[in-house]
Amino acid sequence: MADAHKYTNKLANARVLIIGGSSGIGFSVAEACLEQKCTVIISSSQQSRIDSAISRLLSSYPSAKDRLSGHPCDLSSPTLEENIKTLFSKIDILDHIIFTAGDALVKLSLSEATLEKIQKAGMVRFFAPLLVAKHAVAHLAPGPNSSITLTTGTLSEKPMAGFGVMACYAAGLQSMMRGLALDLKPTRVNLVSPGFVETELWNWGKEEWAKDDFPKMAEQFQKGTTTGELGQPEDVAEAYLYCMRDRNVTGSMISTNSGALLVTGKF
């Protein structure tokens, strides 16, 4: 008699859209979903990034060729909502949507902030997930088996000087998630809050505002943890799997931050 697979097969055959799945945390979530025997659709701003990610994924999971595809969607464009509608028009009914997309963090002091700069800073990280949720309703299978999982960060709970604008959006995602969990019920909506995670996103930062300060900043983040380590995307991906697998979790934020919130002092 064969062993039961009550838990390990919970996500088998689920259709999962990962917006931001071409790199970083989203890429690791795609890997994890393929290992769980899901059908995975990744989305990124450029087709070239999608093609590269699919190639990398298939090098590790060659048997997943028929369960893996991707479509571009530019979340930074003024035509954001139309781009999202176009993305969903190419996709069949889904079971889960994961939103990990993000652009380089904007270090924007209040004295330098203008309405245009503030709106631009929140386009990908705040306005995009809200509009994704709006249009996701018609493309998700009904019931609590389905879920939407968004992404914020510890900036929402432990702000850094110079990042006040981004902290507003990060904290706002907590209220957004809870409101969506009510508005979209019985579909479940949750939020993952990673701390500092070593991904390609920080390589962008090295070339911009953190060009000279990045090594020092990474060292400070590491010292500001209880684990003594920076987060790795393959570990953080587990939080997203949990949000999909547990039909009882909704309106909740899952923190994965190396204990950074327990350490006093500033980053």
Image (spheres, grey):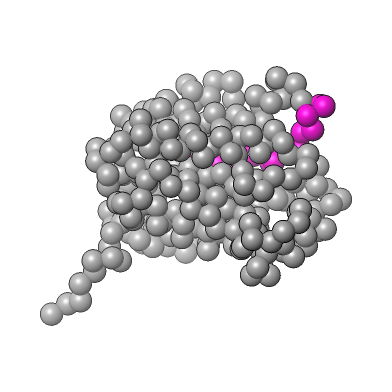
User: Which residue is drawn at the image coordinates 67% and 36% (left, top)?
Assistant: 166
Which quadrant of the rendered structure holds the C terminus?
Answer: bottom right
| First to last magenta residue range | 99-112
- Image point (38%, 37%), residue name: 181
Prevailing secondary structure of the magenta residues: loop
Give whichever of 116, 109 is nearer the camera.
109
Going by the picture, which residue comes out furthest to the bottom? 1
The reply to whether the magenta stretch includes residue 84 is no
Image coordinates of residue 37 in percent, x first then y, are 33, 59
- Residue 111 among magenta residues: yes
Q: Residue lying farthest left?
A: 1
Q: Is residue 126 left or right of residue 253?
A: right
Q: How many marks?
A: 0
Identify the image quadrant of residue 118.
Answer: top right
Determine the residue located farthest toward the right in the rendered image: 212
Q: Is residue 63 left or right of residue 172?
A: left
* Quadrant location of the N terminus in the rendered image: bottom left
